[in-house]
């Protein structure tokens, strides 16, 4: 990583109104759909994969696989780390324009930081840009 | 795309210098939006985070906000 990267913050302004924005959630809290393959918590190096969560998913369809934070609360209400219901409410109220086509969950724990930074993160950004089509991304951790 | 981070680990997040970030003060790890089923609180935190997208740019800064209802429910 260059000095420039260390010093600069990659800030992207949003010029339109929030009421016209489509919003996606990207979470490192290990959230995925129950029907999707769980993250691999047996590998000490962590899991570099991510799961695409379509916008039609509701909170009852989702779960957490992560062993580096206490997700007891998220197990009872996924919204404490993945605010899908709150986002739907804000869309219904017109505060935002709507939900993007999909959201993304990954497991933030990894010992392979270089690969997470150089492979996983750009792949997630590519998905958001080309498939999810979100204007704004809300990021959450565990 | 524009991003906004909701963090409950402000020291760690500050090192990453996020473009926009909200720290709901005192929220514990695993409670980024509040405790389970506090629907109105989840909405407030999310609304505040999204509002940062339209506020004056402070790249790399973590904005701290108080949400008394989080601790009152303790």
Image (cartoon, coloured by chain):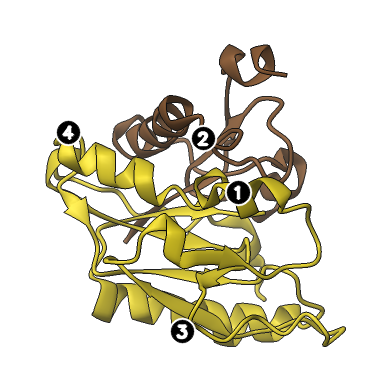
Relative depth, front residue between A109 and A73: A73
Q: Are marks 2 and 1 in contact (CB under 8 Å)?
A: yes
Task: Indicate the quadrant containing the N terminus of chain B: top left, top right, bottom left or bottom right.
Answer: bottom left
Mark 2: which secondary structure? loop
Q: Residue at x 78, y 80 (%)?
A: A41
Q: Are marks 3 and 1 in contact (CB under 8 Å)?
A: no
Look at mark 4 in the image and give the residue it sits on. A93
Which chain contains the residue that carries disc 2? B
Relative depth, front residue between B58 and A3: B58
Other residues around mark 4 within 10 Å, as few (<14) / some (14–19) / many (≥20): few
Q: Is there any visible trace of residue A84 in the rendered image?
A: yes
Whether discs 3 and 1 lie on one chain: the answer is yes
Residue B56: percent from left, percent from top: 36, 30
Q: CA distance from mark 1 to mark 4?
A: 25 Å
* Chain B visual colour: brown
Judge depth for marks 3 and 4 and give the one in front.
4
Q: Earlier in the sequence, mark 1 or mark 4?
A: 1
Whether discs 1 and 4 lie on one chain: the answer is yes
Chain ID, yellow in image: A
Q: Are marks 1 and 4 in contact (CB under 8 Å)?
A: no
Which chain contains the residue that carries disc 1? A
Q: Quadrant of residue A59?
A: bottom left
Whether discs 2 and 1 lie on one chain: the answer is no
Q: CA distance from mark 2 to mark 4?
A: 19 Å
Look at mark 2 in the image and give the residue it sits on. B37
Look at mark 3 in the image and give the residue it sits on. A123
Number of marks in the image?
A: 4
Which chain contains the residue that carries disc 3? A
Q: Residue A76, which numbered label?
A: 1
Mark 4: which secondary structure? loop
């Amino acid at each position: 990583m260059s000095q420039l990267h260390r010093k600069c913050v990659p800030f992207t302004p949003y010029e339109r109104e929030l009421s016209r924005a489509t919003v996606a959630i990207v979470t490192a809290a290990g959230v995925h759909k129950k029907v999707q393959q769980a993250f691999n918590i047996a590998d000490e190096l962590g899991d570099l994969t991510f799961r695409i969560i379509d916008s039609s998913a509701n909170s009852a369809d989702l779960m957490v696989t992560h062993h580096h934070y206490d997700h007891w609360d998220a197990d009872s209400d996924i919204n404490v780390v993945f605010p899908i219901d709150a986002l739907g409410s804000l869309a219904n109220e017109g505060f935002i324009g709507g939900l993007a086509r999909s959201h993304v969950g990954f497991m933030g724990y990894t010992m392979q930081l270089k690969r997470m930074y150089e492979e996983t993160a750009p792949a997630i950004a590519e998905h958001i840009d080309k498939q999810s089509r979100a204007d704004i991304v809300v990021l959450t951790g565990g | 795309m524009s991003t906004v981070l909701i963090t409950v680990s402000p020291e760690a997040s500050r090192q990453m210098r996020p473009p926009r970030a909200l720290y709901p003060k005192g929220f514990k790890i695993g409670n980024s939006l509040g405790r389970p089923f506090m629907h109105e609180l989840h909405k407030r935190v999310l609304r505040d985070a999204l509002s940062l997208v339209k506020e004056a740019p402070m790249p790399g800064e973590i904005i701290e906000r108080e949400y008394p209802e989080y601790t009152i429910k303790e």
